[in-house]
């Protein structure tokens, strides 16, 4: 999942469970809260409001923290960090308690230094742990793969429920928080409702334009329906001002329920798509090495069916509830030769194969240059596009000396 959505989801959980009780400010009366100063003493009244804000920030930062491993890519000369270290130790359930305790201790030190009211160390550790766990969960539901048992094991776990960037999921965790802001005060409620509706409607048209640009068009009826849903969320609560009587905590808890319902829909959609892949494999009597239904944008109705066999990958674009069943194609591996064998022995290629789930090997020769490409077909891209996303390329001269080795970009 993208880092922005991780942060928004962390904030949603923080507001829903760690900093909202329905009082005027929506702040949680956290046990052990003090307004910290140099003497370690303070007034509990202002500390309570401050602690609520710290709790929200802790959940948000916990939701973002695991992606801090992306910084390692800045020091990676060959660009392999994205598959070798990303979603590794910082995404590990094994190391989660250590990260949560360290972040909580750092936050306590910061609050003491700035004399800010702060939850107890145990409470903060729990909040950070919840944020980090939520991040790991949101990465697990994608198809990229997450090393949740690192450093004990390097295998990547992927549940294949949503695409890495899912605008519907992002909306489910963002809209409840915006609705709580819109309906916080009755005087400003209409103006905020109009502003929020206009902004999100404009964003919906922007998403549709972006989808068309990357050749994953969204149906025309989606944006007007989205505009109507936004209108219902922002304008209906204006009636008799009932929206102002709903606490921020209640808005955000309702958002968590909708979020869970959406994931449930993704699960059943994945099962339906996977059954179509299984039916194809059984019908063709394939000797299956790996099989999956991979989510494709822009909606949970779009999937990629993949079957790995000994000689290549069978693939199909699946549209659930379509009149016709999916039509599978086949991408075969190039026959083994000395150049392919030499490429497979390279450490970076071995790292690539630990990451890839549906790899295909291609070989070509032009002007005495021998090129070997490894592509993982699980990632979205037009099947006639060369190279496919996450394609690793190695070139050799006629004597077998490596000329270039790295990600293919043209």
Image: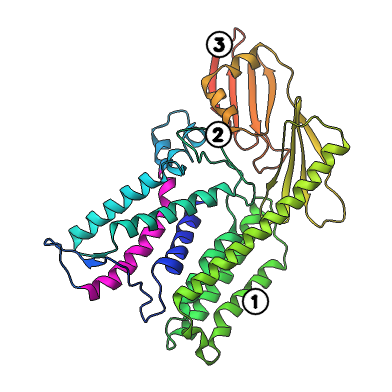
Q: Is residue 137 magenta?
A: no
Quadrant position of residue 33: bottom left
Tell me which label, 3 or 2, sits earlier in the chain.
2
Residue 406 in percent (x, y) is at 53, 27
Q: Is residue 63 visible?
A: no
Q: Which quarter of the rendered picture does the C terminus lie within?
A: top right
Where 187 falls versus 295 (above or below)?
Answer: below
In the rendered structure, are the residues bearing label 3 and label 1 in contact, judged by CB atoms less than 8 Å apart? no
In the rendered structure, are the residues bearing label 2 and label 1 in contact, judged by CB atoms less than 8 Å apart? no
Mark nearest the camera among 3 and 1 is 1
Q: Is residue 263 left or right of residue 99?
A: right
Q: Is residue 123 left or right of residue 330?
A: left
Q: Which residue sits at x=60%, y=14%?
A: 342
**Mark 3 to mark 2 CA distance (whole Å):** 31 Å
**Disc 3: CA contacts within 10 A as few (<14), some (14-19) or many (>=20):** few
Q: Is residue 233 visible?
A: yes
Principal secondary structure, stretch drawn in magenta: helix
Tell me which label, 3 or 1, sits earlier in the chain.
1
Mark 3, secondary structure of its residue:
loop
The residue singled out by tag 2 in the image is 155
**Mark 3 to mark 1 CA distance (whole Å):** 61 Å
Mark nearest the camera among 3 and 2 is 2
Comparing 165 with 86, the one in front is: 86
Residue 139 in percent (x, y) is at 54, 48
Over which residues does the magenta segment extend?
44-68
Q: Which residue sits at x=73%, y=30%?
A: 289
The residue singled out by tag 1 in the image is 228
């Amino acid at each position: 999942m993208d880092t922005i959505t991780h942060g928004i989801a962390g904030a949603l959980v923080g507001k829903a469970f760690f900093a909202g009780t329905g009082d005027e400010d929506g702040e949680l009366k956290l046990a052990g809260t003090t307004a910290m100063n140099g003497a370690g003493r303070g007034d509990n009244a202002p500390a309570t409001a401050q602690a609520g804000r710290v709790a929200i920030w802790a959940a948000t930062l916990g939701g973002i923290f695991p992606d801090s491993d992306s910084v390692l890519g800045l020091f990676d000369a060959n660009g392999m960090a994205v598959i070798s270290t990303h979603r590794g130790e910082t995404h590990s359930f094994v190391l989660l308690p250590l990260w949560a305790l360290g972040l909580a201790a750092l936050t306590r030190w910061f609050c003491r230094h700035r004399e800010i009211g702060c939850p107890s160390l145990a409470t903060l550790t729990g909040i950070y742990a919840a944020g980090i766990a939520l991040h790991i969960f949101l990465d697990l539901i994608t198809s990229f793969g997450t090393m949740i048992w690192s450093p004990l094991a390097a295998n990547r776990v992927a549940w294949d429920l949503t695409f890495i960037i899912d605008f519907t999921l992002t909306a489910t965790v963002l809209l409840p928080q915006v609705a709580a802001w819109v309906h916080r005060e009755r005087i400003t409620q209409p103006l905020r409702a109009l502003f929020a509706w206009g902004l999100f409607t404009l964003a919906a048209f922007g998403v549709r334009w972006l989808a068309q640009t990357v050749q994953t068009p969204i149906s025309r009826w989606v944006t007007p329906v989205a505009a109507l849903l936004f209108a219902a969320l922002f304008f209906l609560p204006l009636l008799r001002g009932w929206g102002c009587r709903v606490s921020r905590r209640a808005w955000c808890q309702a958002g968590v329920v909708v979020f869970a319902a959406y994931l449930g829909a993704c699960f059943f959609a994945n099962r339906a798509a996977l059954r179509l892949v299984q039916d194809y494999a059984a019908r063709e009597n394939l000797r299956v090495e790996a099989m999956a239904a991979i989510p494709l944008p822009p909606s949970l109705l779009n999937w990629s069916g993949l079957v790995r066999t000994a000689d290549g990958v069978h693939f199909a674009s699946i549209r659930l509830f379509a009149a016709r069943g999916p039509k599978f194609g086949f991408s075969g591996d190039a026959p083994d030769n000395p150049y392919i064998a030499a490429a497979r022995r390279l450490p970076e290629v071995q790292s690539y194969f630990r990451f890839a789930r549906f790899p295909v090997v291609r070989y070509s020769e032009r002007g005495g240059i021998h090129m070997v490409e490894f592509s993982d077909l699980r990632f979205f891209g037009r099947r006639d596009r060369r190279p496919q996303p996450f394609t690793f390329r190695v070139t050799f001269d006629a004597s077998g000396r490596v000329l270039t080795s790295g990600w293919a970009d043209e």
